[in-house]
Amino acid sequence: MSRLTYPDRQDFPKELREFLDQLPQHAAFDMLSHSQATVEIFLRQGQAQFTQLVLSPRDRELTILTTASATDCAYEFTQHVPISASVGVSDAVRDAIERKEFNAPELPGDDRAIIRFVAAVVAAPTVSDEIFSAVKERLTPREILEIMQVTGFYWSFGRVCTVLDVEVEKDHGDAVIDASRRMQVPAQ
């Protein structure tokens, strides 16, 4: 059982209800809604990660799975199993990440560089020259920064789930990604 009750959407301002109605019902999204002033901004950042990055969807999912594993967030990991499968992450790679075997021999070199980098970012305020050099050889500066932003987003999202004991739900498949693609982006 979660440590906080889930807010009632009927108590939200109309604009927030309309925004949340564009997304699949999601226990973690509901929990985030306690902060009415920030929930849309936070979820829009997540939307951008599914629709606006140069980083490949596969590398994004490696980043999310590694962040979930490194932060012990079963909720995130569960939600991203089908998404990662749909973008080509194999069961063997996903299983190694889940076991926190970030140097596992079954991880291809490019995957290992990303996974080790993300695990190092989660673990400490700096990363070794060896780990940084390996990721820098494979990715552009923009992709490296996008990985760091995805890691930070999912670290924060994961802590909401772990600290508040958000119940692990059956995965939503690609529903969140599909909703992200359909949603209106606010005027700039």
Image (cartoon, helix red, strand yellow):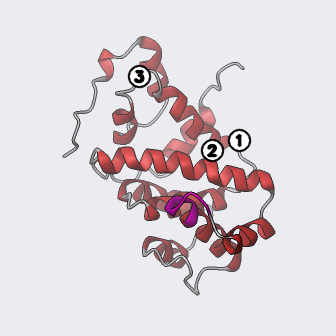
User: From the viewer's perspective, is 157 left or right of 44?
Assistant: left
Residue positioned 31% across, 52% down in the render: 168
x%, y% of residue 174? Answer: 52, 49
User: From the viewer's perspective, is 146 left or right of 124?
Assistant: right
Question: Could you tell me if residue 21 is visible in this image?
Answer: no
Q: Which mark is residue 49?
A: 2
User: From the viewer's perspective, is 89 left or right of 16?
Assistant: right
Label 1, secondary structure: give it.
Answer: loop
Residue positioned 34% across, 35% down in the render: 31
Q: Which mark is residue 36?
A: 3
x%, y% of residue 165? Answer: 27, 48
Give the residue furthest to the top.
14
Q: Which amino acid does label 1 sit on?
A: Gln
Q: Which amino acid does label 2 sit on?
A: Gln
Q: Are marks 1 and 2 in contact (CB under 8 Å)?
A: yes
> In this view of the protein, which residue sits in the foreground, 167 or 122?
122
Q: Give the magenta-colored segment's residue range.
A: 120-126
x%, y% of residue 54? Answer: 75, 50
Q: In which quarter of the image is the C terminus?
A: top right
N-terminal of the two: label 3 or label 2? Answer: 3
> In this view of the protein, which residue sits in the foreground, 98 or 172?
98
Q: Which amino acid does label 3 sit on?
A: Gln
